[in-house]
Image: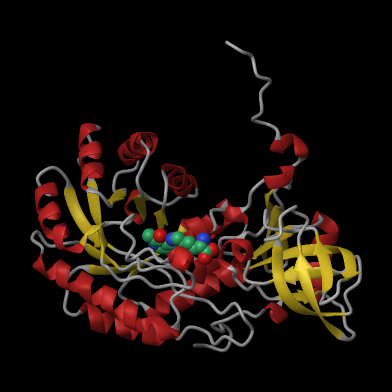
């Protein structure tokens, strides 16, 4: 771990002056993504896993500028849909560096994946059900195939993000070898894949170790030899200022150790780790009111901008940009007409209407999960890189919100 590439960027490390300028120029709510921090996160991860292929799980942040940045750094990419796969190719990833992980794929996704594979040789399609293999064969696909396995080991920050033991994902572990053998007649079988869940912390290493060792074992029983073994992502980041950073070295050591001897290349596919602390969400205070047990601080970003607190009770640290004064315990709440639209309890310095607040770790699963509920346009996204700033997603307008609506003509 080098001093100029610390394992965590805390919310306090963002420059107040810069955030103030950005909010003034681009208005709020506003996502700010620092591409230099994305590069640092990638460099740290690649250094910890020198023999592995690092794939970015694009679902955490599909902004073109982020994808192009990681592409230029040498990352590969994992896509969760045909749409994400398309965006990966648009950002310049070459076929061999793209994996499409098909989760109960609609036919339209498979159609598109087969077309994309023809245009971009080397695309790998990862399937998690025997009938998905048949559906690919029906479409004439005979390319690179990876099998997603359900290792029966789940982990993660919330029950809603533990995929490893969820029957929805992957084929049962004890069926994997025979499925791979039969698939090898029709496809170029290149790998096996599993993902335990999201938000693996230092305490969860036991699960990770278990998953990796099962995958290593499976790989050793399979003939023909595999090109890669993908053990998923899920590397956690500290959301609370008191949380310690993930010790990547021990994760990497545990991974190598659990995998055992193998000719196949190790693949890891983190999303959050690469982008979470590269992003903040800026929001402006519009109401301050005293309630019997708390001070409610109403802000212009809510669950439609950042749904993680409402969906998973996730904590995102919040601070006032540039404000000082007495810290007050507050409930920060959004403008959506729903009681789950709150960011929870936060100590804020002298909360006042017009204050700018920064919400930390917003670079992963932030804008990506935004919605238009309550007819609320999605925020804008700007990227910064050193002194430079650019708009990655313009702010939506009300016209965007209703763009797909048509006047009903009865037939
Ligand atoms: N690989 C696969 C197959 C996955 O399903 C996922 C996440 C990842 C990699 C990346 O996981 P990460 O390294 O980012 O933890 N919306 C939730 C996270 C759900 C992630 C689902 N799959 C959240 O905001 O916490």
Taking the image as four quarters, which one is ligand 1 found in?
bottom left
Q: Quadrant of residue 264?
A: bottom left
Percent coordinates x, y for residue 292 in the rendering: 85, 75
Horizontal side of 323 relative to 102 (left or right) equals: right
Towards the viewer: 213 or 271: 213
Q: Can residue 280 be seen in this view?
A: yes
Q: Which residue is drawn at 14% across and 52% down?
A: 179
Q: Quadrant of residue 6?
A: bottom right
Tell which residue pokes out farthest to the top in this image: 411
Percent coordinates x, y for residue 63 in the rendering: 57, 53
Q: Which color scheme did the rendering employ for the protein?
A: secondary structure
Horizontal side of 343 relative to 104 (left or right) equals: right
261 lies above or below 312: below
How many numbered tags mark residues here?
Answer: 0
Which quadrant: the C terminus?
A: top right
Horizontal side of 210 relative to 371 (left or right) equals: left
Percent coordinates x, y for residue 135 in the rendering: 24, 37
241 lies above or below 133: below
Q: In which quarter of the image is residue 151?
A: bottom left
Q: Can residue 73 be seen in this view?
A: no
Q: Residue at x 75, y 34 (%)?
A: 399
Percent coordinates x, y for residue 397 in the rendering: 76, 41
Q: Which residue is drawn at 27% across and 78% down?
A: 210
45 lies above or below 33: below
Tell which residue pokes out farthest to the front in this image: 292
Towards the viewer: 123 or 173: 173
């Amino acid at each position: 771990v080098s001093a100029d590439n610390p394992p965590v960027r805390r919310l306090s490390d963002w420059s107040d002056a810069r955030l103030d300028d950005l909010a003034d120029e681009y208005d709020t709510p506003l996502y700010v993504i620092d591409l230099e921090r994305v590069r640092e996160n990638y460099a740290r991860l690649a250094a910890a896993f020198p023999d592995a292929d690092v794939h970015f799980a694009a679902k955490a942040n599909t902004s073109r500028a982020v994808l192009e940045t990681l592409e230029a750094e040498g990352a590969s990419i994992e896509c969760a849909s045909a749409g994400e796969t398309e965006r990966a190719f648009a950002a310049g990833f070459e076929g061999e560096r793209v994996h499409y992980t098909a989760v109960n794929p609609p036919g339209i996704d498979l159609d598109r994946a087969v077309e994309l594979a023809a245009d971009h040789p080397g695309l790998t399609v990862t399937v998690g059900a025997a009938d998905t293999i048949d559906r690919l064969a029906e479409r004439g696909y005979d390319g690179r195939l990876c099998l997603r396995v359900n290792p029966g080991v789940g982990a993660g920050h919330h029950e809603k993000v533990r995929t490893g033991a969820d029957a929805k994902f992957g084929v049962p572990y004890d069926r994997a070898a025979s499925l791979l053998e039969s698939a090898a007649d029709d496809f170029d079988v290149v790998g096996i894949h599993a993902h335990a869940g999201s938000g693996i912390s230092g305490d969860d290493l036991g699960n990770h170790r278990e998953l990796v060792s099962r995958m290593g074992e499976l790989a050793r029983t399979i003939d023909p030899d595999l090109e890669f073994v993908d053990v998923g992502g899920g590397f956690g980041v500290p959301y609370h200022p008191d949380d310690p950073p993930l010790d990547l070295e021990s994760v990497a050591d545990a991974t190598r150790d659990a995998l055992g001897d193998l000719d196949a290349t190790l693949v890891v596919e983190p999303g959050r780790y690469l982008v979470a602390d590269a992003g903040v969400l800026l929001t402006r205070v519009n109401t301050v009111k005293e309630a019997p047990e708390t001070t409610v601080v109403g802000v212009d970003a809510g669950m439609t901008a950042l749904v993680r607190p409402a969906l998973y009770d996730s904590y995102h640290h919040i601070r006032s940009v540039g404000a000082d004064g007495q810290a007050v315990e507050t409930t920060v709440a959004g403008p959506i007409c729903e009681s789950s639209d709150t960011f929870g309890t936060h100590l804020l310095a002298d909360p006042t209407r017009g204050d700018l607040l920064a919400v930390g770790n917003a670079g992963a699963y932030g804008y990506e999960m935004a919605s238009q509920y309550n007819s609320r346009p999605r925020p804008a996204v700007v990227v910064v890189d050193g002194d430079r700033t650019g708009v990655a997603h313009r702010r939506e307008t009300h016209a965007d919100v209703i763009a797909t609506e048509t006047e009903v003509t009865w037939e």
